Image (tube, rainbow, N blue to C red):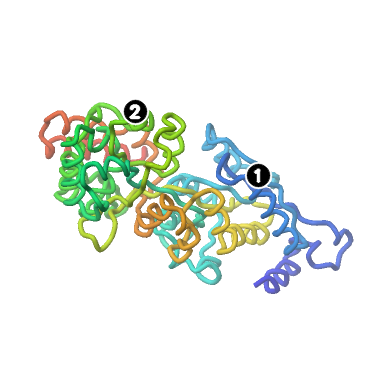
Amino acid sequence: MRRRLLALVCVTGSLLSACGMLPGAHERTTVTVWVMKDSASKDFLRRFTEDFERTHKDLRLDIRVQDWTGIVDKVRKALKGDSGDGPDVIEVGNTQVPLYADGGRLADLTLESMRDWDQDAWLPALAEPGRDGNAQYGIPWYAANRVVIYRKDLFEAAGLTRVPRTRAEWLADTRQLNSHGNQGIYLAGQDWYTLSGFIWDEGGDLAQRKDYKWKGTLDAPAALRGMDFYRRLQALGAGPAGADEEHPPQAGVFAGGKVAQIVAVPGLARSIVRQNPGLQGKLGFFPVPGKSAARPGTVFTGGSDLVVPGNTKDQFAATAVVGALTGAQWDTELARTMNYVPNKTALARAVAGEEGIAAMAAGAAHGRATPSTPQWADVEADNPVKEYMTRVLDGADPAAEARRASARITEQLTPDV
């Protein structure tokens, strides 16, 4: 592939230094890469840069770390620029890709995805938001999702010798944990990401597109079944019906010592132990149970994709960076370093030795993402799903509240003309 790229480069006049035929051929072309704060360690970025520049003698990397705060406006501004001095590769949240692809401002990387990057093996929750029709704009990099963090000692005290693998077992075990004087599970009433997984497991969705129009679908029978399971599970704890998992922060609640389970990313365990060192060695992890033992429950899977701006000064060079970062060698190295899920199920063995990450990878294998539309950001900004959940948990009619929330979602997903 590299030989073909250089041949094209010499014909088009790009990357002249790589052709070795013109004055200044000894100079490298700089590829500017934006990565988000805490996505990769300094040591990882250093090692990747050294390896990439050693194997790509014509290229130099300029990696710039960005803050999540204000990043949407910053990326939008960069995508609109025409000076050629903006970033050539950008890390973006997987669900943000439709927002940036709107208006044709990202490079279409479909050819490389099909020919060189084995796109059929990517995690669906990373790949699907990066795709618009037949065009692939976002290339999956890494993933993370929720699992169940549990107290091994409280399970043992309740006579539970194994973790639940089905929803029915999960409910029964949680009731048994409650009977031993503990809160069987702490599940906040507005944890809509966890609810989404239950809805998807039932075959429903938050919204669906038909005839190029999006419509809220919380009132569909499958989605109502997902909400009913959430209601039954949430009732087995004392989570507030009118707040989400950050109000109060559930790590602090769990650290209090009387909660047996929470649904969270595995990394939250570090915060729990910092707040209560007595829990060191007592925490375990298992995938969110599914409807049957044949597979874990569906979970919302977040993470990052890499995109190439349409205004990059050199798409060939940018694509080479994307291919290296998301390839098996460096993708698995990133997963080991940062405790992520790699971008392909086949690479999950790289994190099999870490209990929390292995549980996360099991769920990510068939994880999902929010509806792939730029307008979904409007839904999250004024989230009717949260209000719907609180009303149902407070005793309102689920079907009526679901119709109300679905209508609001439909309105939010309808672009202003």
Label ID, residue 372 = none
**Extreme residue toward the right, this view:** 23
Residue placed most toward the observer, 100 or 305? 305
Label ID, residue 256 = 2
Q: Is residue 346 left or right of residue 147?
A: right
Residue placed most toward the observer, 414 or 6? 6
Residue placed most toward the observer, 377 or 370? 370
Residue 265 vertical position relative to residue 140 in the rendered view, above or below: above
- Distance from the alpha carbon under mark 1 to that under mark 2: 34 Å
Callout 2: helix, strand or loop? loop
Eye-nearest disc, 1 or 2: 2
Residue 109 vertical position relative to residue 209 in the rendered view, above or below: below
- Amino acid carrying label 2: it is Gly
Question: Which of the image's four quarters has the N terminus?
Answer: bottom right
Residue 264 is drawn in which quadrant? top left
Q: Residue at x 75, y 54 (%)?
A: 60
Residue 295 vertical position relative to residue 84 in the rendered view, above or below: below
The picture places residue 210, in percent across and down from the top left corner, at 27, 54
Q: Are marks 1 and 2 in contact (CB under 8 Å)?
A: no
The picture places residue 335, in percent across and down from the top left corner, at 52, 54
Please name the residue that numbered disc 1 is placed on. 42
Q: Residue at x 67, y 46 (%)?
A: 63
Mark 2: give few (<14), some (14-19) or many (20+) Cα within 10 Å: few
Callout 1: helix, strand or loop? helix
Q: Earlier in the sequence, mark 1 or mark 2?
A: 1
Q: Residue at x 80, y 67 (%)?
A: 19
Mark 1: give few (<14), some (14-19) or many (20+) Cα within 10 Å: few
The picture places residue 323, in percent across and down from the top left corner, at 59, 62
Q: Is residue 100 left or right of residue 59?
A: left
Q: Residue at x 37, y 59 (%)?
A: 365
- Amino acid carrying label 1: it is Lys
